[in-house]
Amino acid sequence: MGRVNGAGTEATGTEAAATEADIVIITGMSGAGRSTAAKSLEDLDWFVIDNLPPTLLPTMIDLARRAKGSLPRIAAVMDVRSRAFTTDLRSTVRELSSRGIRPQVVFLEASDEVLVRRFDSVRRPHPLQEDGRIVDGIAAERALLAGVRGEADLVLDTSSLNVHGLRARIHAYFGSPASASARLSVISFGYKYGLPVDADLVADCRFLPNPRWIAALSPLTGQDERVKEYVLGQPGAAEFLDAYLTALGVVLEGYQREGKQYVTLAVGCTGGKHRSVAMAEQIARRLAGTGVSVQVMHRDLGRE
């Protein structure tokens, strides 16, 4: 699959029409994994344009249409190397929306500590740090992109993801043609490690007894059948699942009406090993049974 720089022209790969649902803008914090996301989309036969000024996106879409469908799905990687980035991006999205085109905006981010470590490892300065420190550049970029993050269709926190983990997330979201229904990620986590910052919804399982205090169950995880039976068999577990899934159905219908295609549901317990894992898998299984496109991930499994 071909990848081009904003000033270049190259196209190879599977032929597919460029439609509204097939236009993705990848942006976010420097060091958060934009290049990895772009390469992952290339592997999926997306036509990836790197370092594209936002104002040129409508031109690229027009070229795709004139090509009579010879271009595959389009992804444009954009960053803050243009100081008018936020203004230009919002203007471009508004222009496209007025033409009936709704690009999906994917925002990648990571914690300050992780970003500093990544910049140190490659020994490169942050593009906005100027004469200051890396943390100064990160702070400036985070402030500059706050509005873009708030309006993004999908926010991915890559702090705890390696290259393979991020590629798996991108493949899960974009590995098949976009559909009208929302794509849901169910992520288990441990509260003691912090809330997932990219969560749209959070469910707390700490009202259930903790298998950690049972000697036979403590070394196991929520993926073990014995732990699942224990957690799901507790008073209130079945009632919680029924009520939560009913409420979730209403929320997902609302998201669909609003055009939100990517939803992240975080399910937490204390350590992210037993209760949240078992409950996340059960929620994902029941949602999949209703036809919802769903993936399940366990952020903190193995950290204890």
Image (cartoon, rainbow, N blue to C red):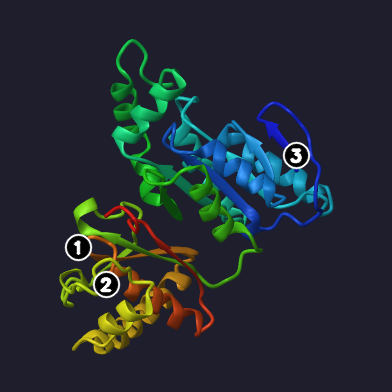
Q: Which residue is mark 2?
A: 275
Residue 35, relative to residue 200: is it above or below? above
Q: At 69% across and 26% down in the image, what residue appears? A: 7
Pointer 2 with pointer 1, Cβ within 8 A: yes
Q: Which residue is mark 1?
A: 270
Disc 2 residue crowd, few under 14, some 14–19, many 20+, Cα 10 Å:
many
Mark number for residue 2?
Answer: 3
Q: At 60% across and 41% down in the image, what residue appears? A: 38
In this view, the residue in front, 59 or 226, is: 226
Q: At 58% across and 56% down in the image, what residue appears? A: 171
Cα distance in 3D space between marks 3 and 2? 44 Å
Local SS, label 3: loop
Cα distance in 3D space between marks 1 and 3? 45 Å
Count of marks overlaid on the render: 3
Q: Quadrant of residue 210?
A: bottom left
Residue 266, relative to residue 87: is it above or below? below
Instruction: Determine whether, in the image, residue 59 is placed left or right of residue 128.
Output: right
